[in-house]
Image (cartoon, grey):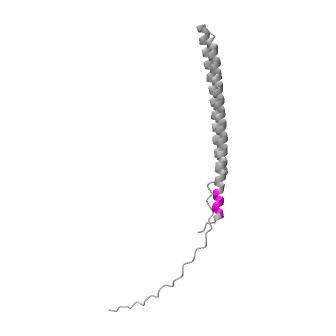
Amino acid sequence: MFIKFEDVLNFGMKRIETVTAATASTTKGLQAIAAEAADYSKKSFDSSCAFAEKLRHTSKPDEIVDMHSSFAKAVYDDFINKATKISQIYSDLAKEAFQELTKQELTKEVPVTVAPAAQPPVVAPAPKAPVASQQS
């Protein structure tokens, strides 16, 4: 059994190309997730600072409770929207990465060139000795 060097080389190169493509799509997805997380953090910080500034200028307890309730609702809604968007990016990321991996035939084995098997030498059976008959 012989394996051609070119077959092994092509076998390995296809896998390297597939993994590289999957890694590129994964990197792109992770960058999108990081950008969304940074955007959410900045917006959350800015809205919290604006809320704190409004609270500083409010003296009536009823207004403070109303402002806090509306702020909490807005923050919760914003969080849910961003979490949904990020989870969708994660889902797309997984689909793209596995699509790249399944696009190639990764289960294919290295082609093997099999040399014809040598025929064993034919050995003639040994002649049987005549059996002497016994007479009693």
Q: Which residues are magenta?
A: 6-12
Quarter of the rendering containing residue 115: bottom right
x 64%, y 44%: residue: 97
Relative image position of residue 107 (x, y in whole percent) = 61, 55
Quarter of the rendering containing residue 11: bottom right
In which quadrant of the rendered image does the C terminus lie? bottom left
In the depicted view, which residue is nearer to us: 132 or 112?
112
Relative image position of residue 88 (x, y in whole percent) = 65, 35
Quarter of the rendering containing residue 87: top right
The answer to whether any part of residue 13 appears in the image is yes
Q: Residue furthest left?
A: 136
Where 114 sits versus 59, above or below?
below
Number of numbered discs: 0
Residue 7 lies within the magenta run: yes
In the depicted view, which residue is nearer to us: 111 or 120?
111
The answer to whether any part of residue 105 appears in the image is no
In the depicted view, which residue is nearer to us: 45 or 26?
45
In which quadrant of the rendered image does the N terminus lie? bottom right
Relative image position of residue 35 (x, y in whole percent) = 66, 33
Secondary structure mostly seen in magenta is: helix
Where 55 sits versus 101, above or below?
above
